[in-house]
Image (spheres, rainbow, N blue to C red):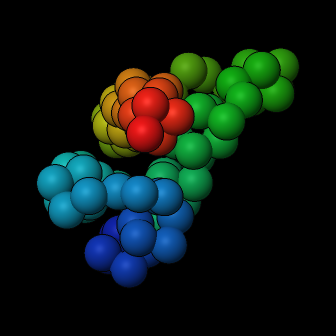
């Protein structure tokens, strides 16, 4: 299994800033673990129905980092939209 490179993260994670990229790489995760974390975030129901255990270890760390990134995007989205309409 190959550890994540900066290019891997940039290709896989939209709008990731340098700090987030460093956090993701710093977990020591692999490309496969990043893909699993993204699958958990996209829709956990199929994984649970497949009787897979909840995300643990590096995958859990990635889920936490990526979910924080999504929360930041959601917070910025409405504010950016209202600023555009105010002009």
81 left or right of 16? Answer: right
Judge whether residue 67 can be spotted in this image: no
Give the quarter of the image for residue 15. Answer: bottom left
Choose between 79 and 51: the one closer to the eye: 79
Q: Is residue 36 above or below residue 56?
A: below
Q: Which residue is painted at 61% across and 33% down in the image?
A: 40
**Residue in view at x 50 percent, y 72 percent:** 11
Residue placed at 35% from the left, 57% from the top? 16
Label total for image? 0
Instruction: Give percent across and percent down for residue 52.
Output: 68, 26
Split into 4 quadrants, where in the image is the C terminus?
top left
Q: Position of residue 53 (x, y in %)?
A: 60, 22
Task: In the displayed orientation, state which residue is furthest to the front.
Answer: 87
Q: Relative to residue 11, is residue 66 depicted above or below?
A: above
Q: Nearer the viewer, residue 70 or 29?
A: 70
* Residue drawn at x 49%, y 52% as measured from the top left: 33
For this orientation, the residue located farthest to the bottom is 7
Q: Position of residue 68 (x, y in %)?
A: 35, 30
Q: Is residue 56 left or right of residue 28?
A: right
**Residue 80: image x %, image y %?**
42, 37
Front-most of 69 and 84? 84
35 over 44 or under it: above or below? below
Tell me if 23 is positioned left or right of 82 in this view. Answer: left
Q: Quadrant of residue 62?
A: top left
Closest to the observer, 74 or 28: 74
């Amino acid at each position: 299994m190959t550890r994540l490179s900066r290019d891997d993260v940039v290709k896989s994670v939209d709008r990731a800033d340098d700090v987030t990229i460093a956090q993701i790489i710093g977990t020591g995760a692999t490309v496969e673990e990043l893909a699993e974390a993204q699958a958990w975030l996209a829709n956990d129901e199929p994984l649970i129905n497949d009787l897979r255990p909840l995300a643990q270890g590096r995958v859990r760390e990635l889920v936490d980092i990526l979910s924080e990134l999504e929360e930041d995007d959601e917070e910025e989205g409405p504010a950016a939209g209202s600023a555009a309409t105010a002009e």
